[in-house]
Image (tube, rainbow, N blue to C red):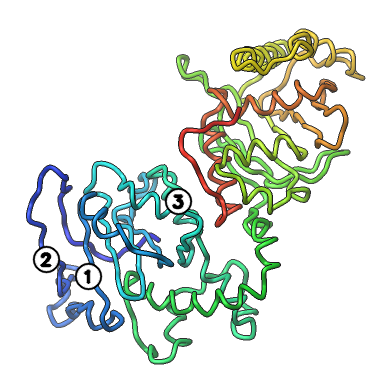
């Protein structure tokens, strides 16, 4: 969670520096809000021990070695939060994570990630273990930033706001689904904490108290977990999402004639890097009404989730060219896509004789023969082309290219969609879909490094 609190100045400590780290501060220095404010108006010293649960141990960890030693034998559940330096200038890039906080009822770990050359392996193992609960407020946003900045997934994550509503519906049931029930609310509800105001690191212990109560309520409400994935779908009030690379907007819900309603799971740009040209923006949609959340939560990686979606449910690609293009150009691109998939499957030995014969030229013939109208000679700038993959219930599966025609072939239809998540067609699309799929199916998604959709 981003914070505007002043931070102590620090340098990047390396494991090899082996300096004598400063003692964890007992007080924070007073900070003037402006140079003209009198000293009598400065903030009073902050004594963290006055706000921590009695007996709590605070450890400030600057190196991977210190992290490995401190976390070697600790067990969850943990309170979780991250901090980074805020940016106030418009257009300024968001700063990376500076501090990661883990809290147990008797220990608080402040981990200075900005001073480390690599992400501590033992910390990564804890964060990516879905069996170890990590609780926080607004934790989905923190999970996305952790993935973007460090390539580490936060699994076993629990949103305290959701659990508060489940465990005590009489008190929190009327709260809006988007409302975060944060630390400002805890002192009002937890005996003995009235009126206290605490730093995130120490209030996480209070969150753990609420977590214990909430988990008991959650056992009675197991049905909530069955629909947890759908709770994280895009806000219905957000009707469009913008591709930052092209400023092309995509509807968050896609409803085409004769097709099921589909949800936007990610978008990205197709770019010819050596020419510096953005060719088109592409959005990936899926019919989430047919998704088996139980099966998806058993996936071991976001790539596996994407693969499963493509294999089982109706999906769509919305392709919007950044400049006027021709049918011939698009056709050639589709043929190259199928050729690349054939080469990949031939290499791994999974290409059958029938799949070899169902080549790209044959797929082109199918498009032309099934087209009920004159083939368009050109596509205008920003004119969308929709490519729909029918669900696995359709035999054979169909690849429906609206405006162009239909291909009826299980292998060609499925492989065409898988191609967008393997290789270099649109790396931004792959990354965006992975992040959103992971966020939707938290907390039970376990990510394994180094895998790709094939």
User: Residue 411 vs residue 259: left or right?
Assistant: left
How many numbered marks have been drawn onto this rendered protein structure? 3
The reply, left or right, for residue 242 in relation to residue 89 is right
Near-viewer residue (296 or 438): 296
- The residue where tag 2 is placed is 23
**Residue at left offset 77%, top offset 38%:** 314
Badge 3 is on which residue? 128
Residue 364 horizontal/vertical position (percent): 79, 12
97, above or below 267, in the image: below
Image coords of residue 202 (percent x, y): 32, 74
Front of the two marks 2 and 1: 2
Distance, label 3 to label 2, CA atoms, is 30 Å
At mark 3, the secondary structure is loop
Mark in the foreground, 1 or 3: 3
Dots 2, 1 in contact, CB < 8 A: no
10 Å crowding of disc 1: few (<14), some (14-19), many (20+): few
User: Mark 1 = which residue?
Assistant: 33
Marks 2 and 1, the one that precedes in the sequence: 2
Is the residue 181 above or below the residue 359 in the image?
below
Q: Which corner quadrant of the image does residue 52 belong to?
A: bottom left
Badge 2 marks a residue whose secondary structure is loop
- Of badges 3 and 2, the one in the foreground is 3
Q: Earlier in the sequence, mark 3 or mark 2?
A: 2
Q: Residues within 10 Å of mark 3 (few under 14, many from 20)?
A: many
Of residues 373 and 46, the one drawn nearer to the viewer in this rendering:
46
390 to the left or right of 182: right
Spot occupied by residue 80 in the image (x, y as percentages of width and height): 40, 63
Left or right, 368 with reference to 326? right
């Amino acid at each position: 969670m981003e914070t505007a609190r002043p931070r102590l100045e620090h340098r990047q400590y390396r494991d090899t520096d082996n300096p004598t780290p400063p003692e964890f501060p007992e007080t924070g220095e007073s900070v003037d809000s402006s140079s003209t404010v009198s000293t009598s108006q400065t903030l009073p010293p902050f004594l963290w021990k006055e706000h921590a649960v009695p007996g709590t141990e605070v450890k400030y960890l600057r190196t991977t070695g210190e992290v490995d030693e401190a976390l070697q034998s600790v067990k969850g559940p943990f309170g979780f939060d991250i901090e980074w330096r805020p940016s106030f200038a418009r257009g300024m890039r968001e700063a990376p994570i500076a501090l990661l906080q883990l809290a147990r009822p008797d220990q608080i770990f402040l981990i200075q990630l900005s001073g480390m050359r690599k992400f501590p392996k033992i910390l990564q193992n804890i964060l990516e273990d879905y069996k170890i609960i990590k609780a926080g407020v607004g934790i989905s946003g923190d999970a996305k930033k952790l993935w973007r900045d460090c390539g580490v997934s936060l699994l076993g994550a629990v949103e305290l706001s959701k659990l508060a509503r489940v465990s005590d519906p009489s008190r929190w049931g009327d709260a809006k689904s988007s409302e975060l029930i944060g630390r400002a609310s805890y002192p009002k509800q937890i005996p003995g904490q009235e009126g206290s105001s605490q730093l995130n690191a120490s209030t996480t212990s209070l969150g753990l108290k609420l977590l214990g109560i909430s988990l008991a309520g959650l056992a009675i409400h197991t049905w909530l977990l069955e629909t947890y994935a759908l709770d994280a779908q895009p806000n219905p009030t957000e009707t469009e999402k913008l591709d930052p690379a092209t400023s092309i907007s995509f509807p968050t819900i896609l409803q085409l004639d004769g097709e099921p309603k589909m949800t936007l799971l990610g978008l990205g740009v197709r770019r010819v890097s050596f020419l510096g040209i953005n060719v088109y923006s592409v959005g990936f949609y899926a019919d989430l009404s047919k998704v088996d959340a139980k099966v998806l939560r058993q996936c071991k990686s976001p790539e596996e989730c994407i693969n499963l979606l493509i294999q089982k449910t109706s999906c769509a690609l919305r392709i919007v060219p950044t400049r006027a293009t021709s049918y011939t150009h698009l056709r050639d691109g589709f043929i190259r896509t199928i050729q690349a998939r054939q080469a990949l499957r031939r290499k791994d030995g999974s290409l059958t004789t029938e799949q070899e014969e169902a080549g790209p030229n044959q797929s082109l013939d199918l498009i032309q023969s099934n087209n009920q109208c004159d083939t368009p000679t050109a596509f205008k700038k920003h004119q969308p082309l929709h490519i729909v993959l029918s669900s696995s219930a359709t035999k054979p599966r169909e690849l429906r290219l609206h405006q162009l025609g239909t291909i009826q072939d299980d292998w060609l239809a499925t492989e065409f969609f898988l191609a967008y998540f393997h290789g270099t067609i649109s790396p931004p699309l792959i990354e965006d879909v992975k992040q959103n799929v992971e966020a939707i199916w938290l907390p039970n998604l376990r990510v394994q490094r180094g895998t790709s959709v094939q």
